[in-house]
Amino acid sequence: MLKRKLTVVLGILVLFSMVLSACAPAALPAAQPAAPAVEGEASWWRTAAQTAGCEGVTLRGISESTPPSRYAADVLAKAFEAETGIKIELEATSWDEMYTKAINDMQAATGIYDFVYIEQDIIYQYLANNYLTNLTQLLADNPELASPDFDFAKFTTFIDNFKDAEGNIYGVPMEAFLKVYLYRKDLFSDPAIQEAFKAQYGYDLAPATTHAQYRDIAEFFTQYGRDNGLDLWGTTVQGNTGHASSFYEFFESIAPTFGVYNWGINMDNWKATVENGGEMNSDKAKEALAFWVDMLNYAPPEATASTWDEVAASFAAGRAAQGWVYGENAAWIATDPDRSRVVGNVGVALPPVAEGVMEDAESGVGYIGYYDGGAFGLPVSSKNQLCTLLWLQYIGQESVQADWAIAGSRIVMESTYDDPKVQEVDAKVDGYYTLMKEAGPLFRGAPPFPFHAALREVVQPYIWKALSGELTPAEALDQAAAAADAELVNLGYGQ
Amino acid sequence: MADTKTDSQKLVAPVQHKGRRGFLPIETNTFDRYFISVILWIGVSLLWMRFLEAMIPLWVSTVLCLVLAIIIIRKG
Amino acid sequence: MRSNRMGWALLAPTLVILAVVGFLPFFYVLYVSLFDWNPFSNQLGMQWAGVNNFRRLVFDGAFLDSLWRTGLFAFTSVTIELALGFLLAQTLVNSFPGRTIFRTIYVLPLVMAPIAVGATWRLLTIPGFGPIPYYLDRWFGIDFRLATYADQAFITVILMDVWHWTPFVTLTLLAGLTAMPKEPLEQAQVDGANRWQVFRYLTIPMMMPVLLTVIFIRLMDALRIVDEVFMLTSGGPGTATQFIGIHIYRVVVPKTDYGYGSAMSLLVLYFTIVLCWLLFIALAQVGKQRE
């Protein structure tokens, strides 16, 4: 009896393990190592590591699992270890977990992490809590550890996000990208499709410059996909109904194109409702949310379960004709045939905007989309400050930037744009890097809110409910703005 | 699975109360009566804050609960 | 006297552990719940708030909704599990071909970690890729999208819980049924009672302690469910499956509202204790009646 039972259980286990191993993804190709240190010559890095007594030390860091972070973990960390003898353990995890772990560590001053990923939007919270070490000061205090290859002045103006009021720098930028408008060049340039589109809408098919055009294109390709039995829809929507990503897409990419900036919060008196001088439930904001929720009708079914990762995956799988996609994914979508079905067919353009928004962006009043990125910062609680300083300078060298840019579509230094390797890839991604260089100033990161996460948590359920149809866009924003006003008072802003 | 029989035979009331019978519908010992008082105090305070505090301040409920607690502990 | 001291000495390690893992955190949470403490607010550090957090709580619609939703979920899933579990246990008491194999396969969900259950169900239901939406659409024309339709999400979460935990209910009830004395049942049959009467007036009363124990355990589990649901829906769409555990997580972790979150945890603890206590009393009463 027992024997029979055992046989059955074992049989099932064997079967399971076979199924599981068959389903395991093929191992990713190993990333190529960075240029090795020059043989025989005692490098500056090795000497500096010895001076600071860091050899054999292990530095622990945490970051979101994005292409640039994975490159840092897989390639740069190994190169740094070979050069200095300092081991880097970089934990690349989900965005939510990254914040949880980093904030808990810094709040409790446990000192687990020697460097943490600071996204542009959270830095004001961190600075307000004195979580981070002043890198400018630390370098000035330890001139013998300041690498000749490292200079804050070489970075793009994106580094300004990581400065305090006095201009001290708290993070070394390692990631910077735009949320751009991606479209399928093969579909947009197909003569038969162009003809059919013109016949239906009366104007030529081209990347959308207005929201009306965007909607037409989305509707057209959804119908086209249905008629031809294709798994093709008109647009992506980062509309996860249980994750912060949908909040971000709406307030940082969609609402600005309608002229609603800074999440619709009046930064003079910290109010969100129209009655109190805010814009969160203004007509423009409601129009924006209605437009975006309507896009769900033309999006693949996974849209309401999509975060930024799934949006990139949907686009790479050829399931959408156009969409707002995080630029950190642009390079692999356009060039990596192992992961993308649309290699060579990716077009990049500026997002559609409402009237007056472009002028706002050019004059600096507003912006047309999201310029995001992150830096590695050094928590005050770290016990290996000087060793981490070396690592931060290592990733901030000009020489490591080009390969990193190609692996992660991120650029943090002016000089990287001119690198021949980058320019070669630029051609393949339809000029994404050029667009970033030229139109970058039209985009902007999250507003400098010290209460970023707390407010997001209060507002996002209403956005989710609008996406799931539980509330109309107007109801959702009215309730969200009222809740935001109440929470801001709670947090001690704008009594 | 072999000894389920003995297990379930042991499945009787987990605690033998050595209490007494007061006006409460169950037999209670001293600890039970303190426990009931605290539970009631918390519950009443919460409901009070929700429905009555706008008219009658919270300390009234605390006093009432204290009186109730004494009654329960003495006579429950 | 000596034996008394010996007893305390033997108990000491347990008491120390209980104090460290049970009482200390409890009192810490109690302490924190009396403060406004959010590192991202304008006033840094802990600000004395008295019972203000609780005062806010009883008017907090999102919290009360979440509490109500959790209750509804727990009640529905435990009821279904109990009914289904009893039926299966009754079936499994009798011998039939393939019973052992069935029983082995049947308890497999029980050994799975909740997070794995959530992941499995997520893969099954992911729109555009998972088999469940595909076949529902193909065979019945149902547009199954967990992340869009609140009702579907709620029902799926209940189904997932039933799938995961009915085996436990069945096994426990099976143990109870097997241990039941046969004589009263046979006697009743001799006296001409029909199957329903036997079930209603004999089986149920005799099974009462086991039934209550199962309800007790399952209810407590269902009230604090987090991992499976978080994996499957992360509380969405909107707040349709944001049960109390997930709600507290969101307040304490991403929102870093430590004081308010502590107050929430305590209130939930209070409800759980009251519920436990009521069930406990019921169990004790049943035990007394049997004596």
Image (spheres, coloured by chain):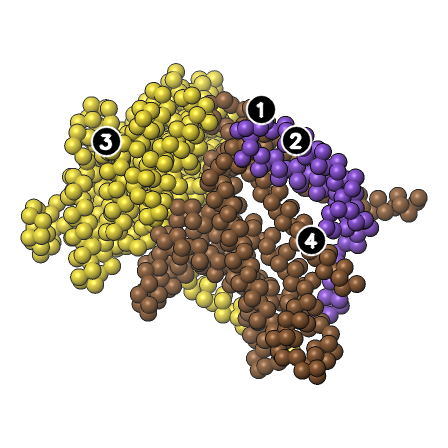
Mark 4–mark 2 distance (CA, rounded to whole Å)? 27 Å
Reply above or below: C105 against A132: below
Cα–Cα gap, marks 1 and 4: 37 Å
Q: Amino acid at mark 3?
A: Gly
- Front position among marks 1 and 3: 1
Q: Chain of mark 3?
A: A
Q: State the residue position of label 1.
A: C48
Identify the chain of the residue marked 1, using the numbered disc in the image: C
Q: Label 4 amino acid?
A: Phe
The residue singled out by tag 2 in the image is B62
Q: Which chain is yellow?
A: A
Which label is found at residue C280? 4
Q: Tell which circle, 1 or 4, labels the residue nearer the N-terminal end.
A: 1
Location of mark 3 (residue): A259
| For residue A302, above or below residue A23 | above
Q: Secondary structure at mark 4?
A: helix
